[in-house]
Amino acid sequence: MKKAYYTLNDYFKETCQTKVVKLSLDGGFTCPNRDGSLDTRGCLFCSELGSGEFTGDTVSTFIRTDSDIKSQISAQKERLKSKWENPKYMSYFQNYSNTYKSIDALRSLYEEATQDESILGLAVATRPDCISDEVIDLFATYSEKGFFWVELGLQTMHEETAERIRRHYSLTHFEAIYRKLMKQHINIVLHVIFGLPGENRAQMLDTVAYVSSLKPFGVKFHMLNVLKGSDLESYYYETEFQLLTQEAYIQLVCDALERLDSKIVVHRVTGDGPKALLIAPNWIKHKRAVLNGIDKELKRRGTYQGIYSHA
Ligand code: SF4
Protein backbone atom coordinates (compact mmCIF):
# COMPACT_ATOMS: atom_id res chain seq x y z
CA MET A 1 0.00 0.00 0.00
CA LYS A 2 1.28 3.44 -0.89
CA LYS A 3 2.46 5.42 2.09
CA ALA A 4 1.33 8.91 3.04
CA TYR A 5 4.85 10.13 2.42
CA TYR A 6 7.21 10.08 -0.55
CA THR A 7 9.56 7.15 -0.02
CA LEU A 8 12.81 6.31 -1.77
CA ASN A 9 11.12 3.22 -3.22
CA ASP A 10 8.46 5.49 -4.77
CA TYR A 11 11.20 7.66 -6.19
CA PHE A 12 13.02 4.72 -7.80
CA LYS A 13 9.77 3.24 -9.11
CA GLU A 14 8.95 6.56 -10.76
CA THR A 15 12.39 7.13 -12.20
CA CYS A 16 13.60 3.65 -13.19
CA GLN A 17 10.70 1.24 -12.51
CA THR A 18 12.84 -1.15 -10.55
CA LYS A 19 13.90 -2.24 -7.11
CA VAL A 20 17.13 -0.56 -6.10
CA VAL A 21 19.27 -1.89 -3.28
CA LYS A 22 22.15 -0.06 -1.62
CA LEU A 23 25.52 -1.74 -1.21
CA SER A 24 27.47 -0.47 1.78
CA LEU A 25 31.13 -0.06 0.81
CA ASP A 26 34.20 0.55 2.89
CA GLY A 27 36.61 2.92 1.18
CA GLY A 28 38.98 2.95 4.16
CA PHE A 29 37.94 6.44 5.27
CA THR A 30 38.20 8.11 8.63
CA CYS A 31 36.81 11.42 9.85
CA PRO A 32 38.41 14.72 10.97
CA ASN A 33 36.28 14.46 14.07
CA ARG A 34 38.04 11.22 14.96
CA ASP A 35 41.57 11.42 13.60
CA GLY A 36 42.50 14.40 15.75
CA SER A 37 42.17 17.12 13.08
CA LEU A 38 39.09 18.46 14.87
CA ASP A 39 38.69 16.00 17.71
CA THR A 40 39.56 12.44 18.60
CA ARG A 41 36.29 11.51 20.25
CA GLY A 42 33.88 11.79 17.32
CA CYS A 43 30.34 13.10 17.56
CA LEU A 44 28.75 12.25 20.89
CA PHE A 45 26.59 9.47 19.41
CA CYS A 46 29.18 8.02 17.02
CA SER A 47 30.51 4.56 17.80
CA GLU A 48 33.81 3.16 16.63
CA LEU A 49 32.48 2.14 13.24
CA GLY A 50 31.78 5.75 12.36
CA SER A 51 28.57 7.68 11.75
CA GLY A 52 26.41 6.15 14.42
CA GLU A 53 25.34 2.87 12.90
CA PHE A 54 21.73 3.61 13.74
CA THR A 55 21.74 5.85 10.69
CA GLY A 56 22.50 2.79 8.57
CA ASP A 57 20.10 1.85 5.84
CA THR A 58 21.70 -0.84 3.81
CA VAL A 59 20.69 -4.45 3.96
CA SER A 60 24.21 -5.40 4.89
CA THR A 61 25.95 -4.39 8.06
CA PHE A 62 29.02 -2.28 7.60
CA ILE A 63 32.29 -4.04 8.31
CA ARG A 64 35.80 -2.75 8.06
CA THR A 65 37.56 -4.68 5.36
CA ASP A 66 40.78 -4.71 3.39
CA SER A 67 39.03 -6.06 0.29
CA ASP A 68 39.00 -3.87 -2.76
CA ILE A 69 35.76 -2.26 -3.86
CA LYS A 70 35.15 -4.70 -6.69
CA SER A 71 35.37 -7.67 -4.32
CA GLN A 72 33.10 -5.98 -1.80
CA ILE A 73 30.49 -5.41 -4.51
CA SER A 74 30.66 -9.02 -5.74
CA ALA A 75 30.45 -10.41 -2.20
CA GLN A 76 27.42 -8.29 -1.32
CA LYS A 77 25.61 -9.05 -4.54
CA GLU A 78 26.20 -12.75 -3.99
CA ARG A 79 24.77 -12.52 -0.49
CA LEU A 80 21.70 -10.58 -1.66
CA LYS A 81 20.88 -12.53 -4.79
CA SER A 82 18.18 -14.67 -3.17
CA LYS A 83 16.33 -11.64 -1.76
CA TRP A 84 15.26 -9.87 -4.96
CA GLU A 85 15.03 -10.89 -8.57
CA ASN A 86 17.42 -8.83 -10.69
CA PRO A 87 17.54 -5.70 -8.59
CA LYS A 88 19.69 -2.73 -9.48
CA TYR A 89 22.16 -1.30 -7.00
CA MET A 90 23.49 1.96 -5.65
CA SER A 91 27.02 1.95 -4.32
CA TYR A 92 26.95 3.61 -0.96
CA PHE A 93 29.88 5.00 1.00
CA GLN A 94 28.20 5.59 4.32
CA ASN A 95 30.39 5.20 7.39
CA TYR A 96 32.91 7.88 8.35
CA SER A 97 33.50 10.90 6.05
CA ASN A 98 33.65 9.57 2.54
CA THR A 99 35.28 12.57 0.91
CA TYR A 100 38.12 12.72 3.43
CA LYS A 101 40.95 11.65 1.06
CA SER A 102 42.84 13.22 -1.82
CA ILE A 103 40.83 13.99 -4.94
CA ASP A 104 42.73 11.33 -6.90
CA ALA A 105 41.97 8.69 -4.30
CA LEU A 106 38.29 9.68 -4.36
CA ARG A 107 38.15 9.60 -8.13
CA SER A 108 39.58 6.12 -8.21
CA LEU A 109 37.32 4.76 -5.43
CA TYR A 110 34.13 6.22 -6.88
CA GLU A 111 35.08 4.98 -10.32
CA GLU A 112 35.63 1.47 -9.04
CA ALA A 113 32.31 1.62 -7.20
CA THR A 114 30.32 2.42 -10.33
CA GLN A 115 31.92 0.13 -12.93
CA ASP A 116 29.57 -2.83 -12.58
CA GLU A 117 26.70 -2.57 -15.06
CA SER A 118 24.07 -3.43 -12.42
CA ILE A 119 25.05 -0.31 -10.46
CA LEU A 120 22.83 2.65 -11.21
CA GLY A 121 24.72 5.24 -9.26
CA LEU A 122 26.52 6.40 -6.19
CA ALA A 123 25.67 7.81 -2.77
CA VAL A 124 28.33 9.40 -0.58
CA ALA A 125 27.92 10.39 3.07
CA THR A 126 30.22 13.07 4.43
CA ARG A 127 30.58 16.32 6.36
CA PRO A 128 30.28 19.80 4.81
CA ASP A 129 33.79 20.68 6.01
CA CYS A 130 35.15 17.76 3.95
CA ILE A 131 33.70 19.04 0.68
CA SER A 132 36.09 21.13 -1.40
CA ASP A 133 35.31 22.75 -4.75
CA GLU A 134 37.20 19.88 -6.43
CA VAL A 135 34.98 17.36 -4.67
CA ILE A 136 31.88 19.23 -5.83
CA ASP A 137 33.18 19.09 -9.41
CA LEU A 138 33.74 15.36 -9.01
CA PHE A 139 30.20 14.90 -7.67
CA ALA A 140 28.90 16.83 -10.66
CA THR A 141 30.38 14.28 -13.06
CA TYR A 142 28.41 11.52 -11.31
CA SER A 143 25.23 13.59 -11.26
CA GLU A 144 25.52 13.94 -15.02
CA LYS A 145 26.09 10.20 -15.52
CA GLY A 146 23.29 8.70 -13.41
CA PHE A 147 21.87 8.59 -9.92
CA PHE A 148 23.93 10.43 -7.39
CA TRP A 149 23.43 12.02 -4.02
CA VAL A 150 25.54 13.29 -1.16
CA GLU A 151 24.38 12.79 2.43
CA LEU A 152 25.15 15.37 5.10
CA GLY A 153 24.71 14.70 8.81
CA LEU A 154 23.15 18.00 9.78
CA GLN A 155 21.26 16.42 12.72
CA THR A 156 20.03 19.78 14.08
CA MET A 157 19.85 23.44 13.08
CA HIS A 158 20.55 24.56 16.65
CA GLU A 159 24.12 25.62 17.36
CA GLU A 160 23.96 24.86 21.09
CA THR A 161 22.91 21.26 20.36
CA ALA A 162 25.57 21.00 17.64
CA GLU A 163 28.15 21.99 20.25
CA ARG A 164 26.74 19.55 22.78
CA ILE A 165 27.05 16.68 20.30
CA ARG A 166 30.49 17.93 19.11
CA ARG A 167 29.49 18.20 15.48
CA HIS A 168 32.33 20.66 14.95
CA TYR A 169 30.94 22.66 12.07
CA SER A 170 28.65 25.66 12.15
CA LEU A 171 25.33 26.16 10.46
CA THR A 172 26.91 28.99 8.47
CA HIS A 173 29.53 26.61 7.11
CA PHE A 174 26.88 24.03 6.31
CA GLU A 175 24.81 26.63 4.42
CA ALA A 176 27.78 27.81 2.37
CA ILE A 177 28.51 24.27 1.16
CA TYR A 178 24.82 23.53 0.69
CA ARG A 179 24.50 26.51 -1.65
CA LYS A 180 27.55 25.44 -3.67
CA LEU A 181 26.17 21.92 -4.08
CA MET A 182 22.76 23.23 -5.12
CA LYS A 183 24.36 25.54 -7.64
CA GLN A 184 25.88 22.47 -9.34
CA HIS A 185 22.49 20.66 -9.18
CA ILE A 186 23.81 17.94 -6.90
CA ASN A 187 21.23 15.93 -4.99
CA ILE A 188 21.57 16.37 -1.25
CA VAL A 189 20.12 14.18 1.49
CA LEU A 190 20.04 15.68 4.98
CA HIS A 191 20.08 13.62 8.16
CA VAL A 192 18.09 14.81 11.17
CA ILE A 193 18.26 13.11 14.57
CA PHE A 194 15.34 13.36 16.98
CA GLY A 195 15.88 13.14 20.72
CA LEU A 196 19.32 14.77 20.92
CA PRO A 197 20.27 15.77 24.48
CA GLY A 198 18.82 19.13 25.54
CA GLU A 199 16.43 19.51 22.59
CA ASN A 200 12.69 19.86 23.03
CA ARG A 201 9.98 18.99 20.53
CA ALA A 202 9.65 22.57 19.27
CA GLN A 203 13.38 22.73 18.51
CA MET A 204 13.25 19.43 16.64
CA LEU A 205 10.36 20.69 14.54
CA ASP A 206 12.25 23.95 13.90
CA THR A 207 14.97 21.82 12.32
CA VAL A 208 12.37 20.04 10.18
CA ALA A 209 10.91 23.36 8.99
CA TYR A 210 14.42 24.60 8.24
CA VAL A 211 15.26 21.46 6.26
CA SER A 212 11.97 21.70 4.38
CA SER A 213 12.72 25.31 3.45
CA LEU A 214 16.07 24.25 1.94
CA LYS A 215 14.27 21.80 -0.36
CA PRO A 216 16.93 19.09 -0.48
CA PHE A 217 16.47 16.03 -2.67
CA GLY A 218 15.95 13.85 0.40
CA VAL A 219 15.83 13.57 4.15
CA LYS A 220 16.50 10.86 6.72
CA PHE A 221 14.88 11.02 10.14
CA HIS A 222 16.51 9.06 12.92
CA MET A 223 15.81 8.32 16.54
CA LEU A 224 18.92 8.88 18.64
CA ASN A 225 20.39 5.52 19.66
CA VAL A 226 22.77 4.97 22.53
CA LEU A 227 25.46 2.66 21.17
CA LYS A 228 28.18 0.76 23.00
CA GLY A 229 31.52 2.48 22.61
CA SER A 230 30.06 5.93 21.91
CA ASP A 231 30.54 8.78 24.37
CA LEU A 232 26.77 8.97 24.53
CA GLU A 233 26.92 5.70 26.47
CA SER A 234 28.57 7.30 29.51
CA TYR A 235 26.56 10.51 29.06
CA TYR A 236 23.41 8.38 29.17
CA TYR A 237 24.44 6.56 32.36
CA GLU A 238 25.78 9.66 34.13
CA THR A 239 23.04 12.21 33.41
CA GLU A 240 19.30 12.48 33.73
CA PHE A 241 19.05 12.43 29.95
CA GLN A 242 15.74 10.93 28.78
CA LEU A 243 15.30 9.15 25.46
CA LEU A 244 12.06 9.51 23.52
CA THR A 245 9.47 6.79 23.95
CA GLN A 246 8.25 4.91 20.89
CA GLU A 247 4.93 6.75 21.01
CA ALA A 248 6.60 10.17 21.31
CA TYR A 249 8.87 9.32 18.38
CA ILE A 250 5.97 8.22 16.19
CA GLN A 251 4.07 11.44 16.98
CA LEU A 252 7.16 13.49 16.20
CA VAL A 253 7.83 11.79 12.87
CA CYS A 254 4.20 12.35 11.84
CA ASP A 255 4.45 16.03 12.84
CA ALA A 256 7.68 16.25 10.85
CA LEU A 257 6.23 14.61 7.74
CA GLU A 258 3.26 16.96 7.82
CA ARG A 259 5.67 19.92 7.82
CA LEU A 260 8.00 18.55 5.15
CA ASP A 261 7.71 19.72 1.56
CA SER A 262 5.92 16.99 -0.42
CA LYS A 263 8.63 16.80 -3.10
CA ILE A 264 11.39 15.84 -0.66
CA VAL A 265 12.13 12.12 -0.82
CA VAL A 266 11.91 10.51 2.61
CA HIS A 267 14.78 8.03 2.63
CA ARG A 268 14.24 6.88 6.15
CA VAL A 269 11.97 7.37 9.18
CA THR A 270 13.56 4.85 11.51
CA GLY A 271 16.88 3.04 11.59
CA ASP A 272 18.34 -0.44 11.40
CA GLY A 273 20.83 -0.03 14.20
CA PRO A 274 23.18 -2.89 14.99
CA LYS A 275 21.40 -4.83 17.72
CA ALA A 276 24.67 -6.03 19.23
CA LEU A 277 25.78 -2.44 19.88
CA LEU A 278 22.44 -1.04 21.01
CA ILE A 279 22.06 0.03 24.63
CA ALA A 280 18.84 2.03 24.30
CA PRO A 281 16.07 2.57 23.39
CA ASN A 282 15.05 -1.03 23.18
CA TRP A 283 11.92 -0.30 21.17
CA ILE A 284 14.00 0.77 18.18
CA LYS A 285 14.72 -2.92 17.49
CA HIS A 286 11.12 -3.31 16.38
CA LYS A 287 11.39 -1.38 13.16
CA ARG A 288 8.21 -2.81 11.65
CA ALA A 289 6.19 -1.67 14.69
CA VAL A 290 7.56 1.87 14.35
CA LEU A 291 6.83 1.99 10.61
CA ASN A 292 3.32 0.65 11.13
CA GLY A 293 2.78 3.09 13.99
CA ILE A 294 3.67 6.02 11.72
CA ASP A 295 1.35 4.79 8.94
CA LYS A 296 -1.47 4.23 11.42
CA GLU A 297 -1.06 7.62 13.06
CA LEU A 298 -1.04 9.51 9.74
CA LYS A 299 -4.16 7.60 8.73
CA ARG A 300 -5.84 8.42 12.05
CA ARG A 301 -4.98 12.10 11.58
CA GLY A 302 -6.05 12.03 7.92
CA THR A 303 -2.81 13.82 7.04
CA TYR A 304 0.18 13.27 4.75
CA GLN A 305 3.60 14.65 3.87
CA GLY A 306 3.54 18.38 3.25
CA ILE A 307 0.03 19.11 4.41
CA TYR A 308 1.36 21.83 6.73
CA SER A 309 4.53 22.76 4.87
CA HIS A 310 4.98 26.37 3.89
CA ALA A 311 6.40 25.76 0.45
S1 SF4 B 1 31.07 13.18 11.46
FE1 SF4 B 1 30.22 11.11 11.23
S2 SF4 B 1 31.96 9.70 11.31
FE2 SF4 B 1 32.67 11.72 12.03
S3 SF4 B 1 32.49 11.56 14.25
FE3 SF4 B 1 30.59 12.49 13.53
S4 SF4 B 1 29.15 10.78 13.19
FE4 SF4 B 1 31.23 9.91 13.40
Image (spheres, rainbow, N blue to C red):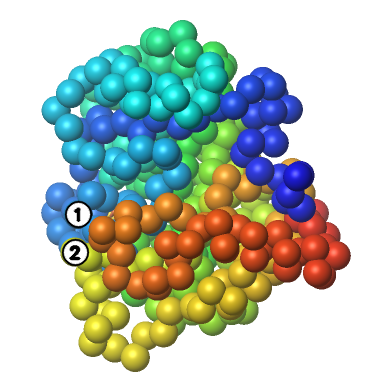
Q: Position of residue 122 (x, y in %)?
A: 46, 26
Query: Image quarter for residue 133?
Result: top left
Q: What residue does disc 2 label?
A: 229
SS under mark 2: loop
The quarter of the picture where the C terminus appears is: bottom right
* Separation (CA) of disc 2 from disc 1: 6 Å
Q: Amino acid at mark 1?
A: Glu
Q: Which residue is mark 1?
A: 48
Task: State the residue at coordinates (35%, 20%).
Answer: 78
Q: Which mark sits nearer the N-terminus, 2 or 1?
A: 1
Instruction: From the viewer's perspective, tell me whether residue 250 is left or right of residue 59.
Output: right
Which of the pair 105/177 is nearer the observer?
105
- Give the crowd class for mark 1: few <14, some 14-19, many >=20 residues within 10 Å: some
View extreme (front): residue: 82
**Residue 168 horizontal side relative to residue 117, left or right:** left
Q: Secondary structure at mark 1?
A: loop
Circle 2: residue type: Gly
In the image, residue 31 above or below residue 286: above
In depth, the one of 256 and 156 nearer the eye is 256
* Residue 51 seen from this side: yes
Q: Residue at x 41, y 27 (%)?
A: 80
Task: Relative to 120, say whether 271 is above or below.
Answer: below
Measured from the top left, where is residue 21 in percent x and y? 50, 30
Residue 6 bears which disc, if any?
none
Q: Where residue 262 appears, x then y in whole percent?
A: 76, 49
Residues 128 and 81: in front is 81
The answer to whether the residue bearing label 1 lies less than 8 angstroms from the nearest atom of ligand 1 is: no
Residue 308 horizontal/vertical position (percent): 81, 64
- Vertical position of residue 149 compared to residue 257: above or below: above
Which quadrant: the N terminus? top right
Labels 2 and 1 touching (C-beta < 8 A): yes
Q: Which residue occupies 55% across, 40% down?
A: 188
